[in-house]
Image: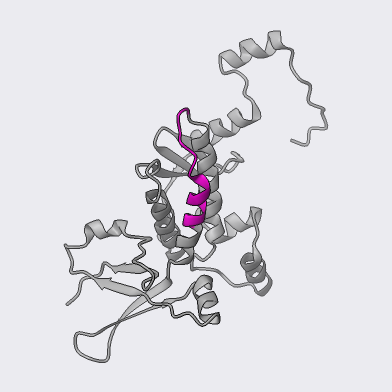
Amino acid sequence: MGMGKEPVQLLNPIWHPLHKYGLIHTPREEQCHLLCNASEVSVPETPYAGDFMRALHAVLLLDERTQLFRPSFRSGHTAGLDVLLIDTDLLIHERCLDFNQWHAKTPCRLSSQASTVNIDIDTFSCNHIVTDLHNMLLIELQNRPGSDCSQDSSLRLKVSQNLDEMPRKIEIAQGPEVGEVQVSWVDSASDAAFRLNGLDIKGRVTLYREGTCLHKREDLLSTQGAQCRFQYIILEELT
């Protein structure tokens, strides 16, 4: 903490009684304590945070071990820890909900360029944030007795691929004809790579009437065979 002091390891006769009654912590225990006791924060009502939550929720659904986990975001300004798993409560540092907060600690090419030209990023496009959190979660699971981690490598690949296949900045507008709906989105980098190599990318938009599609909110990373790389569910009411 900048006190100009050198730390000294405590002798076991001093350490064990203090540690036994929770009067002193290891660095990891102190980080967990700080994040666990930090104030819970609400998810901001911003397009960026909304897209991040959809991506995170979808990743949790891909693994049977994490489908029932409940994300809880904590202020954690001094915790120094981004992810902590307590039973089915997934505690996450709030910085992942804001582009600038996350990249202040972990910059990437997009954040560096955005900072150079002084623009705000309002579309969630940094998949590495979710994959980083997912990797931290897998480490938490590995520390749980009896957890089967044999498929973690293939799961990491699946998460990365499916995040790449999620369309971004989806917009819906009235078409030129009566009863026609126009749906547009921004292709991901992976789609550009496919087109670069002469492959035709096909997507499918599924429309549902209000009241019939609530359970379809779970279909966030759906793939439908070789000719349909993604499916996006429109939840707005159709007239």
Relative image position of residue 52 (x, y in whole percent) = 45, 58
Q: Can residue 153 be seen by looking at this rendering?
A: yes
Q: Is residue 47 above or below residue 85?
A: below
Relative image position of residue 76 (x, y in whole percent) = 55, 42
Relative image position of residue 37 (x, y in whole percent) = 49, 33
Quarter of the image for residue 26 reads top right
**Residue, x 49% and y 39% (percent of image)?**
149
Farthest front residue? 226
Between 203 and 226, the one nearer to me in the picture: 226
- State how many labels appear: 0
Between 219 and 9, the one nearer to me in the picture: 219
**Residue, x 49% and y 40% (percent of image)?**
150
Q: Is residue 7 above or below residue 209?
A: above
Which color scheme is applied?
A: one colour
Q: Which residues are magenta?
A: 145-159
Farthest top residue? 13
Q: Is residue 187 magenta?
A: no
Q: Is residue 153 magenta?
A: yes
Q: Can residue 75 be seen by looking at this rendering?
A: no
Farthest bottom residue? 176
Between 60 and 146, the one nearer to me in the picture: 146
In this rendering, position of residue 234 left or right of residue 8: left
Quadrant in the picture for the C terminus: bottom left
In this rendering, position of residue 29 left or right of residue 65: right
Q: Is residue 200 above or below residue 161?
A: below
**Residue, x 47% and y 75% (percent of image)?**
187
Quadrant in the picture for the N terminus: top right
Between 227 and 162, the one nearer to me in the picture: 227
**Residue, x 59% and y 34% (percent of image)?**
31
Relative image position of residue 7 (x, y in whole percent) = 78, 25
